[in-house]
Image (cartoon, rainbow, N blue to C red):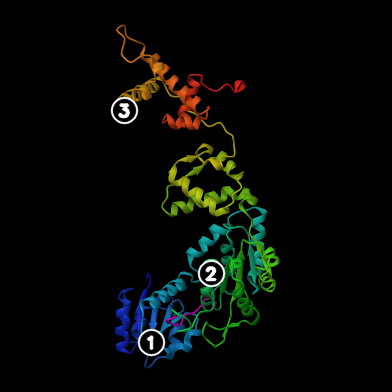
Amino acid sequence: MTNKLYILDQQEQRTFRLGAVLSFISEAHEVLNYHELDQYLDTDSKAVILLGALSSQDHEQLIRRYPACAFLLLGETLKHHLGLANVVGLLTEPFSYASFTQLLRDCQEYQRLLPGQKGQCEQSRFIGMVGQTQAMQQVRFLIQQVAKTDANVLILGDSGTGKEVVARNIHVLSNRNQGPFVPLNCGAIPAELLESELFGHEKGAFTGAISTRKGRFELAQGGTLFLDEIGDMPLPMQVKLLRVLQERVYERVGGSQPIRADVRIIAATHRALEQMIEEGRFREDLFYRLNVFPIETPALRDRADDLPLLVQELIVRAEQQGHAKVKFTERALASLKLHSWPGNVRELANLVERMAIMFPNQVVDVAELPQKYRHLDVESYVPVYPDALLERDAINELFQSQEDEEEGSEEQLFPQTTGIEILPEQGMDLKEFLAELEISLITQALERHEYVVARAADILCLRRTTLVEKMRKYNLMRDESQA
């Protein structure tokens, strides 16, 4: 737990049993009364409070006093307070580690998604709202138009285009921005658990339901519920969701008490829902309930002019995550603009991070990009080195080869075509010998791999640019007219 946890319960034996379970999870502070709690907290404090019996204080007043705190109620007698937004769940004896960890996780989620947090707003601006193309201006316009209403929104677009960020921006600009924004990926929850995840459950509703738990609808009360990948929702669950959208009430699994759904629904999918309707895999009536105000997020390939701005933002983000700075040449950016980007912004973010790892504090040109991102046939700079350096390098390679000869085959290191194994009595021109040896080895490597320079460089343990420079020096470039 990142935030402090307090137990306020005047049943001493229960507090003792509770502390025993909590000792395996998180450090908890026991407070005797609400006056002592006031000494630790103010109205904006973030904490988890386990609230039990009180002798002289109204529970509801205390809960409302600390809206940023997540409350867990102790005992069935307090069950009627579950309707309060910052009451996350109810614990009953016997206390168990499993139910505790699940509810504490829900408390963390309540506090992580608190509206108005700086980090969340920065992320929204960074991921979703970068770009000046007409497509992005249209998305911003649609967000501004629909945000102040309570209309259901359906966000369509390929994976990785930032559909959740669009949903968050709608929430931030809406009249519900003081309420929670609760996301749920419908495709990530097993079908048999999705109903409980959405609507919550009562204790004993099914095997494993060892405590009462709020669902996402209840956690999003007064705010926004974002149903991502709605196209993956099973048909039986679609019927139940449609009922809630029509009647605005629901019950927890295993319960009979109706709960009013004061929630705005934003759904998203990368699937073609209208085609799924024709195939019988998505309900037409649910589609029209959700598709009141559609927003389509553009694919990166359709807004390639935004790519330099996106790259710059992603570089800043990589730096904030501890990576070194990296820069891209104009030619590299031009090549990236020609890519189809099937993974959209998510794919671009992965590429920027990879380049920052491979070329820290360096400049990336087309030649440094992975092969599939090289869409420009540009002539990269190939350095020309002084003869003294080249001769020293060749001699070092020769002596290294002689050292390796003890472990390998002499025929492999020094082909018979060289014709010299022992220094002649009359001496020799070492520079000329080394050049002929180098020409012979390079020619063999090129012919073996049909002049594919990258493969030849691999077997010679040379960089591709180094091999190209040597080929030019010895005039070994392939004659295209004879190819």
229 or 440: nearer the eye? 440
Q: Which residue is mark 2?
A: 183
Does the segment drawn in magenta span residue 442? no
Q: Which residue is mark 1?
A: 52
Disc number at residue 479? none
Q: Residues within 10 Å of mark 2 (few under 14, many from 20)?
A: some
Tell whether label 2 touches label 3 (CB within 8 Å): no
Q: Is residue 133 left or right of residue 182?
A: right
Q: Residues within 10 Å of mark 3 (few under 14, many from 20)?
A: few
Task: Provide residue 14's location: percent of width, then percent of height.
Answer: 32, 87
Q: Which residues are magenta?
A: 209-217
| Point 48% across, 68% down: residue | 117
Q: Which residue is mark 3?
A: 404
Q: Closer to the N terminus: mark 1 or mark 2?
A: 1
Task: Provide residue 65's location: percent of width, then percent of height.
Answer: 45, 83
The reply to whether residue 472 is visible in this rendering is yes
Does the segment drawn in magenta span residue 210? yes
What's under tag 1, amino acid-wise? Gly
357 or 173: nearer the eye? 357
Q: Closer to the N terminus: mark 1 or mark 3?
A: 1
Inter-mark Cα distance, 1 to 2: 30 Å
Inter-mark Cα distance, 3 to 2: 61 Å
Callout 1: helix, strand or loop?
Answer: loop
224 or 423: nearer the eye? 423
Residue at the far bottom: name it. Answer: 55
Task: Provide residue 338's location: percent of width, then percent of height.
Answer: 61, 43
What's under tag 2, amino acid-wise? Pro
Residue at the far top: name it. Answer: 426
